[in-house]
Amino acid sequence: MRKTSLLFYGCILLAAYCLLSLTGCKKKEVKTTTEKVINVQVQPAVKKSLKPFIEAVGTLNPYEEVIISTEVDGIVKDVRVDEGFLVSKGQILAMIDETDYNLEVKRSEAALKQAEATLSNTKIEYQRKEALHKEQLVTQQQFDDVLTRLSLADADVERAKASLSLAKQKLLKTMIYSPLSGSVKEKKVEKGNFVKNGSPLFTIIHSNPIKLNFTVTEKDVGKLRVGQDVLFNIDAFPDKEFKGKLKTIYPSLEENTRTLQVEAQVPNQNGLLKPGFFTHVTLYTGAERSTIVVPDISLLYERDKIKIFVVEGDRAKERFVRIGQKYKLNSGVREFAEIIEGIKEGELVVTVGQQNLFEGAKVNVAR
């Protein structure tokens, strides 16, 4: 009887063990793998009418710059301007002591009067000798002598006139005038200084309009035309865009850099633009053309290839593209790349999350 009970309990335990084993196997069979979904943001590829352009860096320079030097020796009597002063054409900048030059004018005037008096007396004598010579009352030698003295007296008068004119010119040059309207860039003289003929005194610049000088690469030279629009920005006014016109295309390239120097002319009525400013230049080289653009941040670079991802349904598709120029649309800060080949207008381009994608990946487009 006891053996029968033990056998009965053993069978029950064995059955329970088998039941638990079967249940565990079923649970393992239920476990499955879930596909990963990648969150992305997209933006449609759009078609825009845009102008082709060249980008460069440049520098602003004065439209005119002159160094004003003295043409006479002397002590500086007065200086009427300083650095930064605005001056007009013909304005007096400085004066040199004119005392010695006034005396020279007076001496020359006296010399001229003396020469004119001598000439007048010689003319009277000539007229008298001429009448006597006709009546053969004076010798030929006497007549020739007075004729010679008349010529010399006339020459003395002309020489005295020239000396007086030169003295007056030197007197005038004791006043230093500005030859153009502009501003004083540099002052190199002070009141009381002794200056010699040729000593530089001031540098005057004219900056309205102002020149914009920059270079373009050899491959872009054929796109240049006088009169093309030139837009540029400067760091001092990051929110402003300035505009000028291409005025000069230099005749030869720089041999070392293989670049060509060009020059634009820019209005500067308010004086915001200063010579020496560094500029970021955009030169438009043609008429508007229709082109597809996508945000620059959507591009992925793989060595010499460029690709983007587009969304079709709930899947990511890999596209290799060929790009052209880059643009900033509507004066924004985000750049857009021109797509020459590889994508169509309206396709949804991944702009956020593309680094995690692969061909055929399942995506969720975030709104």
Image (cartoon, rainbow, N blue to C red):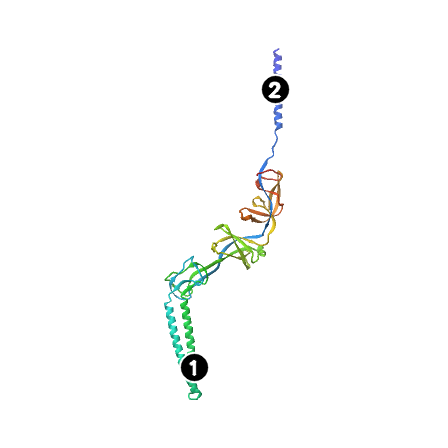
Q: Which type of secondary structure does the marked residue at label 2 adopt? A: helix
Residue at image position (62%, 19%) is 15
Q: Nearer the viewer, residue 16 or 68?
A: 68
Residue 55 in the image: above or below residue 35: below
Where's the N terminus, which quadrant?
top right
Where's the C terminus, which quadrant?
top right
10 Å crowding of disc 1: few (<14), some (14-19), many (20+)? few
Q: Is residue 204 left or right of residue 254?
A: left
Residue 2 position, x and y percent, is: 61, 11
Residue 41 position, x and y percent, is: 57, 40
Residue type, label 1: Thr
Mark number, residue 260: none
10 Å crowding of disc 2: few (<14), some (14-19), many (20+)? few
Q: Quadrant of residue 68?
A: bottom left
Query: Mark 2 highlights which residue?
Result: 16
Alpha carbon distance from label 1 to label 2 = 159 Å
Residue 355 position, x and y percent, is: 57, 41
Query: Mark 1 highlights which residue?
Result: 148
Residue 53 in the image: above or below residue 133: above
Q: Is residue 348 left or right of residue 275?
A: right
Q: Nearer the viewer, residue 220 or 336?
A: 336
Q: Are the residues at dot 1 and dot 2 in contact (C-beta closer than 8 Å)?
A: no
Residue 153 seen in the figure: yes
Name the residue furthest bottom. 136
Q: Nearer the viewer, residue 244 or 23?
A: 244
Looking at the image, tell me whether mark 1 or mark 2 is earlier in sequence order: 2
Residue 208 position, x and y percent, is: 48, 58
Residue 151 in the image: above or below residue 236: below
Name the residue furthest top. 1
Q: Which type of secondary structure does the marked residue at label 1 adopt? A: helix
Residue 280 seen in the figure: no
Q: Nearer the viewer, mark 1 or mark 2?
A: 1
